[in-house]
Amino acid sequence: MSKSNLRRDADLLLHRGSRVEGAYPVSRSRRPVEVQRLIGAIGNLMLSGDTPMMEKFVAGKIFHQLQYPGAVSSRPASHLRLGPQLQFALRQLTQKGRAFAEVAAAINDLAKSLDWSSSSTGPFASMNIEKAHAHAVIAGAAGLEERDDVTLGLTIMEPYSRFPDHVQYRARVFLALSDCEFLCDEKGWQQASPGSAFYNEAGHTVAMRCTSRPLLAAWCQMER
């Protein structure tokens, strides 16, 4: 499969239709408390001392922008068919420690308010991947918080699923919130556990997969 063909399925994650204390500063805005709690909890993990340099550098720019709130969206929420898989992943995440439990609780509080959607299939995807995954945007275009400078989102996948290879137009940082694997360009498949962060450059190929347990991940990128 050539890169030009992969580009037709680029950016499939885009929505269609140990803790470091104080690592993510609290917003002084009128942002809803539940949204601020989730952004802050994810930021604390992405900017922790264990995050590699490039991942932390890119995520740092994004979470710096997220200190300043966007508009509260009036977009209606959508039903998440993968609710049982999400709840399983959140229960597992809660057992990993305080910072992870905070992320799990914050996701749980907002899960029913998010607009969940799925992407199309593509190269090397598992069968029925369109029904085996869902994405939601927390902050960004079509997100709970509408903004055009950055995007922060979530992805949930059923067990034994593989997301298709696709090319990203923006540099992106992924944060694993479950045991899973990421494929970032030519680096090969890399094992991930909760708290693992991965950077994928703009214009490069990425994919992700899981085995007997659901995949849960957060991801973020600069838009301009």
Image (spheres, grey):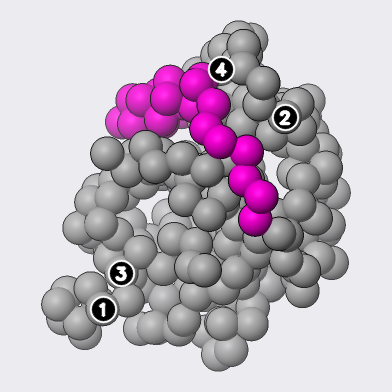
Q: Secondary structure at mark 2?
A: loop
Quadrant where the image shows the C terminus:
top left
Give the x, y percent position of residue 171.
29, 46
Q: Badge 4 local density, few (<14 within 10 Å), some, or many (20+)?
A: many
Image check: 210 left or right of 88?
left
* Residue 194 sits above or below residue 62 on the image: below
Q: Secondary structure at mark 3?
A: loop
Q: Tell me the CA gap for discs 3 and 4.
A: 30 Å
Quarter of the image holding residue 122?
Answer: bottom left
* Residue 150 sits above or below residue 188 on the image: above
Quarter of the image holding residue 145?
Answer: top right
Give the x, y percent position of residue 128.
58, 89
Q: Badge 2 local density, few (<14 within 10 Å), some, or many (20+)?
A: few
Q: Tell me the CA gap for discs 2 and 3.
A: 32 Å
Tag 2 residue: 32
Which amino acid, mark 3? Answer: Ala
What span is in magenta?
A: 50-75
Which mark is first along the chain, 2 or 1?
A: 1
Tag 4 residue: 24
Which amino acid, mark 4? Answer: Tyr
Q: Secondary structure at mark 4?
A: loop
Residue plotted at (23% across, 73% down): 7
Image check: 43 left or right of 120?
right
